[in-house]
C-alpha cells in the first residue's frame, strides 16, 4: 500500500511538472511568434500613426544590485525619458536588454513623476501592430528602463544623484514589479 501511495504522489508531481513546462513553452512560443512579426517604423508621423500606450516606467528603489533611485532623483530627471525609443524585448529571466533596430516599436512622448502612481508615469506611441495587439490582450504588461546614473554614497548607501535613460523596453517581467504598460 505504501508503494502505491508513493507511486501516486510521484505521478502527481510529474503531472504538475508537465503542466508547468507547457505553460513556459507556450509563453516562449508566443514571444517568438511576436518577435518575428515586428515591423520597424523609423519615423513616427507627428504622433498620429500608431497606438497610444502608457504606464509606470520606474518607481523608487534599488534594482539588480544597482544604486538606490530616490523619489527626489526620479522627480528631477523624469522628463529625460521623453523622446527615447521603445523596444520589444524578448530577453527573459532578467537578461540584459536585447535592443537593436529590428525590435524598435515606438517612442516615449511624455514622462513625469506622479506621486499618486508613486513613480515616473509615461506615455508613448507604438508603431508595431502585433505588439499593440499583445498589449491589448495583456500578454505584454510590463516595461523595463535602460538606465544609467551618477552615483554617490549617501549615509553608506550607493544612491543615484542623476539618472540617464537609454530606452524603454516592453517585457514580460521587469526588475521593477510596478513598471507597466497598458493601452490608453
Image (tube, rainbow, N blue to C red):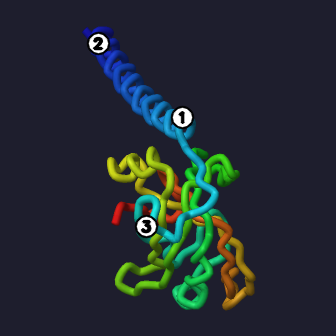
Q: Is residue 36 above or below residue 92?
A: above
Q: Name the element at disc 1.
A: helix
Report the residue at 48% width, 59% height from top.
126
Within-10-Å neighbours for mark 1: few <14, some 14–19, many 20+: few
Q: Foreground mark, 1 or 2?
A: 1
Report the residue at 49% width, 53% height from top.
173
Query: Which quadrant holds the N terminus?
Result: top left
In percent of width and height, residue 80 lies at 62, 81
- Examine the image and state in which quarter residue 156 appears: bottom right
Q: How many marks?
A: 3
Residue at mark 3: 178
Residue 75 seen in the figure: yes
Report the residue at 45% width, 58% height from top.
142
Left or right: 90, with 141 as reference point? right
The dot on residue 160 is: none
Q: Is residue 112 above or below residue 101?
A: below
Q: Is residue 18 above or below residue 130?
A: above
Q: Earlier in the sequence, mark 2 or mark 3?
A: 2
Q: Earlier in the sequence, mark 1 or mark 3?
A: 1
In percent of width and height, residue 157 lies at 67, 83
Q: Earlier in the sequence, mark 1 or mark 2?
A: 2
The dot on residue 32 is: 1
Residue at mark 2: 2
Q: Name the element at disc 3.
A: loop
Q: Foreground mark, 2 or 3?
A: 3
Amino acid at each position: 500500500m505504501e508503494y502505491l501511495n508513493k507511486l501516486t504522489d510521484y505521478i502527481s508531481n510529474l503531472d504538475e511538472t508537465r503542466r508547468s513546462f507547457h505553460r513556459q513553452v507556450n509563453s516562449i512560443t508566443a514571444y517568438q511568434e511576436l518577435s518575428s512579426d515586428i515591423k520597424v517604423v523609423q519615423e513616427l508621423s507627428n504622433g498620429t500613426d500608431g497606438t497610444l500606450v502608457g504606464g509606470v516606467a520606474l518607481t523608487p528603489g534599488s534594482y539588480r544590485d544597482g544604486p538606490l533611485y530616490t523619489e527626489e532623483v526620479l522627480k528631477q530627471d523624469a522628463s529625460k525619458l521623453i523622446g527615447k525609443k521603445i523596444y520589444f524585448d524578448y530577453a527573459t529571466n532578467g537578461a540584459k536588454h536585447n535592443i537593436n533596430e529590428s525590435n524598435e516599436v515606438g517612442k516615449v512622448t511624455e514622462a513625469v513623476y506622479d506621486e499618486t502612481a508613486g513613480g515616473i508615469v509615461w506615455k508613448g506611441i507604438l508603431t508595431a501592430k502585433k505588439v499593440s495587439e499583445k498589449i491589448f490582450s495583456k500578454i505584454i504588461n510590463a516595461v523595463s528602463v535602460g538606465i544609467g546614473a551618477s552615483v554617490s554614497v549617501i549615509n553608506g548607501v550607493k544612491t543615484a544623484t542623476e539618472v540617464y535613460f537609454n530606452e524603454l523596453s516592453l517585457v514580460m517581467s521587469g526588475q521593477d514589479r510596478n513598471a507597466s504598460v497598458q493601452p490608453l
